[in-house]
Image: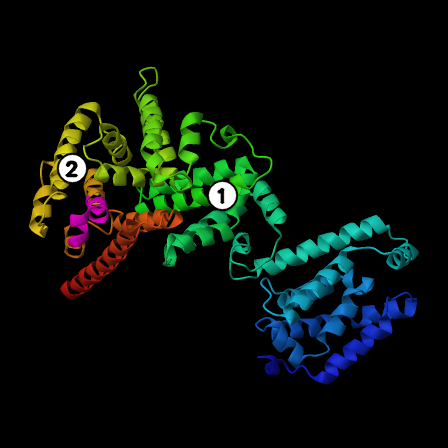
Amino acid sequence: MAEDTSISASSFEYWLNKAVEWGNTTTFESQQDVCRHLPKLQAFLKQIYGAIQHMNVTSVLKLFPLIGQLLGRLCWNPFVVAHEESHQNLLQCLWCLYSAEPENAVELKANEWIWTLLQSMTGVDHEVRSFVQSLHYPDGEYHSKLLKNMVSSLVKELQGCQCDRSSLFPRKKIFLSEAAVMSLWLRSLPSLEQGFFHLIETLISQPCASLLEVEAIITDSLLPKAAACHPSLFRVIDDFFRTILLESDGHPKIIIIIQAFMRCFVQALLQMQPQMPLKIYFPCNHQPLVMALLVNPSEMPSAAWSQHLMSIIQILKEIVEDEEVTRTSVNLFENWFLLAHFGDWVNVALQQLMMADDISEMLLWLLMFYYEPHMENQKENHSQENMKSVYNQIKTLSNKSTLNLEDLRTALFTGNLCTEQNHLKELINHLLVSFLLFSAGGHRIAKESVQLFAGAAAGGISELLASTAHRLKNKRCGASKDDTVQSTIELLQQQLLETQSERVQSSDILH
């Protein structure tokens, strides 16, 4: 592309000689010469910009070895920089040479050089101040005009980009320090919104190998750290999550993103000194419940899970069933939304329920609330009895010496739950996953049991498997049982992918 611009080495030499000749334009003759040559200089700088805008720094320096000397001298020339169009042309060229993510020493050195030039373009040293005063132009006004020109030039440059300029930072098109990004988000809601939705788009559009990779992408977005440093940003981001969750009708992938974000947020919160009160982040929630949920299961021995879960359930049950508090949809949703932030405890409840000797009414209540929070009391009692029946049927299979797929199918279709709410069908699917992962009989028939998942793609099976694997990896006790669970998870994930692929192929054939 550069060869098509007809930029010769002699042209660079000519303009470099001119820049040397002009020096700092301290004489009237040199000032006049700059004015005469500015139109041609602008045209030449535009040629340079057209040639290098799609090249990396190393390639530019090989093709135009004099470019650094030329741009450097022009940027130090106050008469050239004071001219708005020339100023814009110089910034465009520097923009092309700057690397947001430098990969070698050349790019690092170029970045340092560009920062020095930018400082010189906005600074007023003694020599320049004397020159400006000789023109009877107030140096403060000159400096202000210079800054306005620079901002105007950058805005024009950003407006010319194909991508949206509120999205330039998250897309790595422009580099800003962490403090600058947080300051930008605090003062510009559209900028924060762009950063948030770029993160969601990234996590949804590109498949991630594990939740560890999801958390790495979330951390890299700087949003969790910003939310921890500035509670006002946390509340805005939380509102974004609330909106997107409602619009997606509680899609499992959105829920798992929220939970991954919260893990990153809590880590950032723990690193803050001094730490701010939790009430600033969760002003409308019951604080003992927030404190109990914030504790990650991986931070305590598994033997203590049951007691901690009971504490969470007791607090939540009292809040939801408090006669003095109106059982409004808003009240129920907000408490459910808080619980959904910390889904690891729901995950643990599924595991505890399947591993218990007898059914726990409290654990079942928590799961029923999580999967169907708006259920009316009469309907809740009816569904809870049916769910108990399904659970008891599944549990009896744990003690069978021989187990086949038909036995499991019969247990799952006990009662009338299969014709009830979709969210309770999701609970049944998740009980099945818990049985396959945490019982010896389940391990034996895990491979063929995948076909029993009703609406597996929409029911959050993949998300549950991923979150369970992530939770167990965070707290490895060295037990062989954990290894068996991990192997079963990998088997189910593979079988689920194959089953979904077969369904897609069958659909393509039918159409």
Identity, as a three-letter code, of the amino acid under mark 2:
Tyr
Between 250 and 146, the one nearer to me in the picture: 250
Q: Which residue is mark 1?
A: 267
Task: Tell me where the magenta segment starts and ends, as one range.
Answer: 432-444
Q: Main secondary structure of the magenta part?
A: helix
The image quadrant that residue 208 belongs to is bottom left
Q: Quadrant of the C terminus?
A: bottom left
Percent across and percent down for residue 23 are: 86, 70
Asked whether residue 45 appears in the rendered view, the answer is yes
* Residue 189 seen in render: no
Relative to residue 214, is residue 192 drawn left or right? right
Instruction: Identify which amino acid the numbered label 1 is placed on.
Output: Gln
- Give whichever of 469, 505 is nearer the camera: 469
195 w.r.t. 115: above or below: above
Q: Residue at x 82, y 69 (%)?
A: 34
From the top left corner, tell me how far across and down residue 353 is, in percent: 23, 37
- Earlier in the chain: of badge 2 and badge 1, it is 1
Do the residues bearing badges 2 and 1 touch, measured as CB atoms within 8 Å?
no
Query: According to the image, what is the colour scheme of the structure?
Result: rainbow
Residue picked out by circle 2: 391
Residue, far top: 324
181 in relation to 54, above or below? above
Q: Which residue shows up at 76% across the image and 69% down it?
A: 72
